[in-house]
Amino acid sequence: MTTQPADLTVGSQPDLAQGLILLCPAGLWTARSQTDLARALDHACNEQPRAVVVDLGRLEIAGEIDGAALGELHSGAGRRPGVLLLWANPGPALARLGWLMRSRSLFGSVDEAVAHALRNPGGMVTPPWVCERYPAAPEATAASRRLVVRACHQWDALDAIDDAQLVVSELTANAVEHGRGDVIVSVDLRDGTLTIAVRDENPAPPTPREAEPDRHPLRDRGRGLVIIERVSTGWGSLPRYPAGKTVWATLATHRGA
């Protein structure tokens, strides 16, 4: 996808096999550029990748750029659970920004940023991010549970395995029942937090509701969301561009802390 604002173009190069999205803003930085880049960051982060890398090398800076502007962009996009936001390849004008240069999220080149995003911390032998696409069929729920179980075993996050299975079952079943298109499930481990995200092409967000008296709680998708609220440290829904949604939930684990 590519957005076409007046002063800035923001190209996007997704590599969801590795969980990466590379954003390439190019053109003149103006007051409007912050809004344009923020929109592109929203679109990228809402896909719930492992990391978003912003290549700053094609930006043209006329005069001074406000360091607070990039700081606001970084903190806003960085609130997405499980998404690592990295900046790379700063030009001479950006190199004058002390805040940006001191940031642990800034790298001299795109290759360095990508290598950092793909690192396996704590001696892990497998990447702490997995993603699978399933057809929207009932079998997807069992497959997503197997994905979570395999990931938790590989990452030694066994303390979260039961709640993780409950969460991914509910989110995947919701996507199969109410979503559109294939269901994409990703699992990420960072800083003691396990993030589970499920994407589909239906933009309508899920709505928790109390259980109906004549229905079993585990067969009531809305009731399942109430249970997710109780076992997770947070959950929410994000719009996808151009259509669809990402529903995520986070769980605490001792691994990766």
Image (tube, helix red, strand yellow):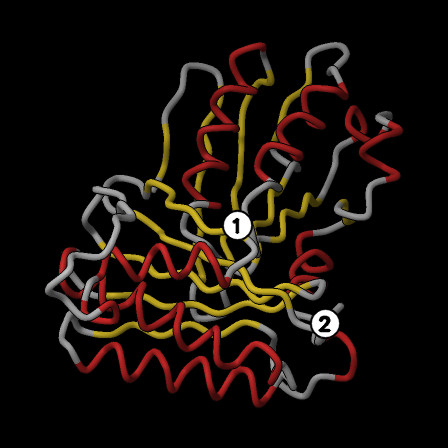
Q: Nearer the viewer, mark 1 or mark 2?
A: 2
- The residue at which mark 1 appears reads as 22
Say left or right for 106 vs 33: right
Residue type highlighted by circle 2: Gly
**Residue 183 falls in image quadrant:** bottom left
Residue at disc 1, secondary structure:
strand
Tell me what residue is drawn at x 50 percent, y 37 percent. 41
- In the rendered image, the vertical position of residue 247 relative to residue 24, given as above or below: below
Residue at disc 2, secondary structure:
loop
Q: Indicate which disc residue 186 carries.
A: none
- In the rendered image, the vertical position of residue 51 relative to residue 99, given as above or below: below
Q: Position of residue 125 (x, y in %)?
A: 67, 88
Tell me what residue is drawn at x 41 percent, y 39 percent. 43
Q: Residue furthest left?
A: 214
Q: Position of residue 127 (x, y in %)?
A: 60, 78
- As rendered, which of 213 and 169 lies closer to the eye? 213
Say left or right for 72 vs 214: right
Residue type highlighted by circle 1: Leu
Q: Indicate which disc residue 256 carries.
A: 2
